[in-house]
Image (cartoon, grey):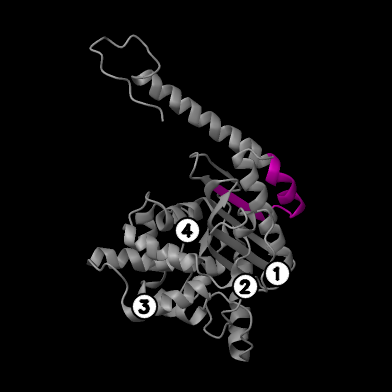
Amino acid sequence: MRRYGAVVALVTVIAGLAAEGCGRTETAGSSAASSRSPAERPAARPTGRLAQNTGKRNTGNPSGGPGRAIAHARHDVSRKEAAERDLDAAVGPTASADGGHVSVAVDDLTTGVQASYGGRREYVTASIVKADILATLLYLGQRRGDTTLNADDREQAATMMEDSDNDAASDLWWQAGSAAGVDAANKAFGLRETRGGSGQYWGLTTTTTDDQLRLLRELLTTRSVLSASARDYARGLMSSVEPGQRWGVPAAADAGTGVAVKNGWLPDPSLWVINSIGEITHDGHRMLIAVLSDDNESEDGGISVVQRVAGEAADAVTGDT
């Protein structure tokens, strides 16, 4: 769980930054903050057929009937258990060296294998909550019968997602209903461990890597309450982030493949929160990855940890270890 003393200290720091107008460090929601990211980081390396009806009684043929379903279920469980073991072995040493302040969750959309390391540990979101704000706005519009955001909201959404602009995020946070609106949408999305930040402090929303995978599925896959057009729109924004913000999860992507990403970074109050969520292709597998970290001694050090963990996790889940 987050230390509430650290959160109080962070709010104090944010207020000080806003008063001083120093504005080049991303804050938890202050409109005085810069929208710019760190310099661009180099990328590290990133069914069976139904049985035919022959008119004969099924006597246990594995090609059909409940026996096959049970076998598939056992196979899925064994694959998940194996992936969890491989992920623990791959990420555990890095996480231990980092003091346990990093978690990761992976959904291999190609094979259906899912695994997480520290998947329910709570972290402050920083700017990855902007993806949640976008999802909430799309969901609310869909409930009203709107097929798209209006022109002004689309302009702000693009600035919020592609440039990580904080002023745009603050405006859209209020339009989404602030914490109450985002929390209500998250309930519809199936997020269980995410709570919106108080008042204007959207960046102090708390979440887990398991919940961030659920959010990514809503934004980027058919396992979603959002319409196809809404998901296409979200993917377009997450695929068009400025070059300086294509660090984190994209470091594990195959060379020459597209990525969809949203990153977050925040001093808390002097140590860094560094988060990255997105979709990549790794060893030919399409996968969703969420990496969250805190108590990093520096921004660059946190980015390095997140990228290393993303690569280790992707290798583990695809069996490339």
What residue type is disc 2 on? Gly
Could you tell me residue 37's position as x and y percent? 62, 75
Upstream in the sequence, badge 3 or badge 1? Answer: 3
The Cα–Cα distance between marks 2 and 4, rounded to whole angstroms, is 27 Å
Residue drawn where x is 48% and y is 65% of the image: 238
For disc 4, the marked residue is: 194
* Image-quadrant location for residue 302: bottom right
Q: Position of residue 271 (x, y in %)?
A: 70, 69
Q: Which amino acid lies under the numbered mark 3 shown in the image of this protein?
A: Asp
Looking at the image, is 71 positioned above or below residue 133? above
**Would you say residue 85 is visible in this rendering?**
yes
Is residue 196 in sight in this rendering?
Answer: no
Quadrant (top left, top right, bottom left, bottom right) of the C terminus = top right
Residue at far bottom of view: 20
Residues 115 and 179: in front is 115
- The one of 169 and 182 positioned closer to us in this rendering: 169
- Distance (Cα) linking label 3 and label 1: 31 Å
Secondary element type, mark 2? helix
The local secondary structure at tag 3 comes to helix
Q: Which residues are magenta?
A: 89-106
Q: Residue under circle 1?
A: 299
Q: CA distance from mark 2 to mark 1?
A: 14 Å
Q: Position of residue 300 (x, y in %)?
A: 72, 68
Kindly check if marks 3 and 1 are in contact, taking CB atoms under 8 A apart as contact. Answer: no
Q: Is residue 96 magenta?
A: yes
Residue closest to the eye, 197 or 37: 37
Do callouts 4 and 3 mark residues in contact (Cβ within 8 Å)?
A: no
Residue beneath label 2, please? 244
